[in-house]
């Protein structure tokens, strides 16, 4: 209905502009008025048009209403204020959506992805040096929910995890495991500050010793042993990470190894290509801005001319030891994704990577001509508390609380929904005790209980011998109460919420919507009786409940959260 109304008014706008010799159109977008007294939809298109043609907004609105041909569902229109156009629909017209929701079921609000654009969504990509912490978990949940919502709105989504298994952190992990192996042999070992603490390193050492005898490892060349232990430790850590992600219902289409990127020669090839084009050059970087660097010595390096594409300083491609920088590897990886012909590249990064966006986008623009690729979503930290007091450490990790410990304590549903209750770029306070409560204070319980409440109503109807009528035959005009109309408007808004969540890469919008819908449902439940003596009204209200339950179930599914029938 909203689309039909916008199309009708858009045609009137184009005709109006033609009358005034204007060719460039103005896009019509309808909104929901804050109160029902101002109609079902409103448009403010008259005001921007007025300045273009030299008329008052009220006069423009009046002429638009003369030109427009509304669909028959429109009962009346009015001009409000300086030129707002308020649109009123015939009674019960919007309620016809209830039958559509029930018949469409899980497809309500969704768009086929068969011919849709493709997108590679890369998220988590935590260093494979230990179990995931809650910060990683929030990025994982945001990325997974984003991918689900994008797929629901017609995007062919490919989910990818980039394994950082070629950096110095892998060597540190190998050294940490070797020290633990020696300790397990009875040696007294001094652990440097750089070593990874935590029980998981000891577990990895034990598992590796079961496969390879300590004596055999001792006889290896030190560098050979470091490489072997590093690769084996990464494999074990990725098993832990996969298991942690699986506990949240998160799975990837591909795990991409940075090590294979180095082995393929792709990075060196890309650097050579940049030098041939003159985009890479040998030069000296100035000292960092805003601070003095002791004993600063300018060193000639191979630099990428990212300043030509919006960056504030050119970026090194080769380290002083002759190996590629992390930046060079990252560009090569993004180019590899680009060459797989994805229409969009979407990355979910931690908020501490905010300063890294411009340089990567500058490099991709230089190489592909595309601006603002990849699209980056930054995810802020999680402040983990228990009854308001900070929770900081665990025995297993040594320095932080692992994601798995939180999931095991409060459950996957509570973790996923709570992580999505705020914008990704906003810090999140997550209280473990609140997440376990069976009360309105717990957001996921509040929404899930709404679904369970609908199921209870339908079960009660069945127990009383009420058979659900064919949705198309239900007299929805009987739904006249303000709370019923509010629920119907909420349901009508669901597809738009999905569209905004997908296009803006903001899955939190779905969680916010579900909380609002559940609130309206609970209010309605406490005020009205659904199953009563009036058979026609009972069927209308049961259809309303079926539609509400379906949309809650659909929305929770897109967030990766269960919709229990009983609680």
Image: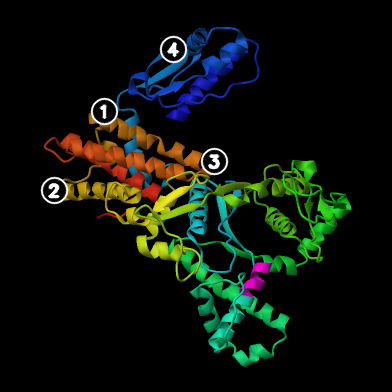
Q: Is residue 18 magenta?
A: no
Q: How far across and how far down the image is residue 138, in percent?
A: 49, 54
Residue under numbered circle 4: 81
Q: How far across and how far down the image is residue 421, in percent?
A: 42, 46
Residue 432, compared with residue 291, is above or below; it is: below
User: Image quarter for residue 328?
Assistant: bottom right
Q: Is residue 172 magenta?
A: yes
Residue under numbered circle 1: 482
Q: How far across and how far down the image is residue 370, in percent?
A: 72, 43
Q: Secondary structure at mark 1?
A: helix
Q: Report how far apart the C-alphas of labels 4 and 2 lie in the structure.
A: 52 Å
Residue mark closest to the camera, 3 vs 4: 4
User: Image quarter for residue 312?
Assistant: top right
| Viewer-proximal residue among 277 and 530 | 277
For the C terminus, the image quarter is: bottom left
| Viewer-proximal residue among 397 and 488 | 397
Q: Report how far apart the C-alphas of labels 3 and 1 lie in the structure.
A: 32 Å
């Amino acid at each position: 209905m909203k689309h039909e109304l916008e199309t009708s008014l858009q045609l009137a706008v184009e005709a109006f502009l033609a009358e005034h010799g204007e060719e460039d159109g103005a896009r019509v977008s309808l909104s929901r008025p804050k109160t029902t007294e101002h109609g079902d939809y409103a448009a403010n298109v008259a005001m921007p048009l007025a300045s273009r043609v030299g008329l008052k907004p009220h006069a423009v609105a009046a002429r638009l209403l003369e030109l427009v041909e509304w669909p028959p569902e429109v009962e009346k229109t009015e001009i409000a204020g300086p030129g707002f156009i308020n649109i009123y629909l015939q009674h019960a017209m919007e309620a016809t959506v209830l039958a559509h929701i029930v018949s469409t079921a899980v497809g309500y609000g969704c768009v086929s992805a068969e011919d849709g654009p493709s997108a590679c969504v890369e998220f988590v990509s935590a260093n494979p040096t230990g179990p995931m912490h809650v910060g990683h978990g929030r990025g994982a949940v945001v990325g997974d929910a984003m991918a689900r919502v994008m797929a629901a709105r017609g995007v062919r989504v490919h989910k990818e995890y980039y394994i950082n298994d070629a950096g110095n952190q892998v060597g540190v992990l190998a050294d940490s495991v070797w020290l633990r192996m020696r300790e397990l042999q009875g040696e007294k070992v001094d652990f440097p500050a750089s070593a990874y603490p935590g029980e998981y390193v000891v577990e990895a050492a034990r598992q590796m010793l079961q496969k390879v005898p300590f004596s055999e490892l001792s006889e290896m060349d030190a560098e050979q042993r470091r490489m072997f232990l590093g690769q084996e430790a990464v494999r074990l850590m990725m098993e832990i990470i996969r298991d942690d992600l699986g506990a949240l219902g998160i799975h990837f289409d591909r795990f991409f190894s940075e090590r294979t990127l180095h082995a393929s020669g792709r990075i060196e090839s890309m650097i050579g290509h940049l030098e041939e084009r003159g985009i890479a050059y040998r030069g000296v970087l100035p000292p960092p801005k805003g601070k003095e660097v002791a004993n600063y010595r300018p060193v000639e390096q191979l630099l990428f001319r990212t300043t030509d594409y919006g960056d504030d300083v050119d970026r090194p491609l080769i380290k002083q030891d002759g190996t590629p920088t992390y930046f060079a590897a990252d560009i090569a990886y993004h180019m590899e994704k680009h060459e797989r012909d994805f229409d969009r590249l979407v990355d979910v990064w931690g908020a501490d990577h905010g300063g890294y966006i411009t340089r990567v986008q500058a490099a991709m623009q230089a190489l592909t001509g595309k601006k603002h690729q990849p699209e980056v979503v930054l995810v802020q930290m999680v402040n983990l508390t228990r009854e308001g007091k900070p929770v900081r450490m665990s025995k297993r990790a040594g320095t932080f609380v692992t994601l798995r410990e939180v999931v095991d304590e409060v459950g996957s549903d509570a973790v996923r929904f709570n992580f999505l209750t705020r914008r990704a770029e906003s810090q999140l306070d997550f209280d473990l005790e609140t997440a376990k409560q069976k009360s309105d204070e717990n957001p996921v319980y509040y929404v899930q209980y709404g679904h369970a409440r609908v199921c209870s109503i339908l079960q009660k109807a069945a127990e009383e011998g009420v058979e659900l009528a064919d949705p198309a035959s239900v007299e929805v005009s009987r739904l006249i109460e303000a709370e019923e109309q509010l629920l119907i408007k909420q349901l009508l808004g669901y597809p738009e919420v999905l569209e905004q969540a997908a296009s803006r890469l903001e899955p939190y919008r779905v969680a916010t919507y579900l909380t609002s819908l559940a609130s309206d449902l609970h209010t309605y439940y406490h005020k009205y009786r659904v199953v009563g003596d009036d058979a026609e009204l009972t069927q209308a209200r049961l259809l309303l409940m079926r539609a509400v339950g379906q949309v809650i179930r659909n929305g929770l599914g897109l967030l990766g959260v269960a919709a229990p029938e009983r609680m």
